[in-house]
Amino acid sequence: MAARRIRFDRNIWGLFLSIPQPVIAALHGYVLGSGIEMALCCDLRIASDDARFGMPEVGLGIIPAAGGTQTLPRTVGIGKALEMLLTGDWIDARQAWGIKLVNRVAPRKKLSEICEQLAEKIASYDPELVRCAKRAVLQGLDLSLSEGLYLEKILACRLAPTDSSNHLQL
């Protein structure tokens, strides 16, 4: 329980969520409890084909306390999240991909290489554009559709070229 208290006090997961650049999680082996919670704070999750996922907290007499009850249903849907949270059942990498817990599944030996290639591709784009795209998606989830569309428009106009022929109309 001391480890949980330290995580609460330091808000490690909040730090992940506050990073404006995309964060990629390379997942392998056993991704359980806080491991899933940490991965869910990342923007992209790539799993090795040998990865196993589970939320065992209820069986241990506790509930997830690092965001799992909030981030898991937003990612995989309420029904599957409740099934994972309430039963403690584990799933494999293919099942995790099927429920959208992970973005891709890769052979274990190629996991690092695939994550690096993905990171390099994203890094090849204008960093401000990438940050704004991430911001539009993540902030937009907490807004109504009309407010989200307005946020998108504001960000797009802020990034638009200043050339008057390419000026976006508000």
Image (cartoon, helix red, strand yellow):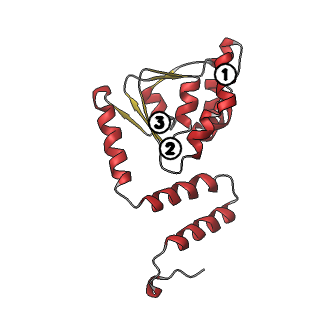
N-terminal of the two: label 1 or label 2? 1
Horizontal and vertical percent position of residue 136: 57, 58
Q: Nearer the viewer, mark 3 or mark 1?
A: 1
Determine which residue is flagged by label 2.
43
Which type of secondary structure does the marked residue at label 1 adopt?
helix
Q: Amino acid at mark 1?
A: Arg
N-terminal of the two: label 3 or label 1? 1
Q: Quadrant of the C terminus?
A: bottom right
Q: Nearer the viewer, mark 3 or mark 2?
A: 2
Q: Amino acid at mark 3?
A: Val
Horizontal and vertical percent position of residue 128: 47, 61
Query: How far is mark 3 from mark 1, CA to CA?
Result: 25 Å
> What is the number of the mark on residue 102?
3
Is the residue 70 above or below the residue 108 in the image? below
- Left or right, 106 with reference to 34: left
Q: Nearer the viewer, mark 1 or mark 2?
A: 1
Horizontal and vertical percent position of residue 146: 68, 65
Query: How far is mark 3 from mark 2, CA to CA?
Result: 10 Å
Which type of secondary structure does the marked residue at label 2 adopt?
loop
Which type of secondary structure does the marked residue at label 3 adopt?
loop
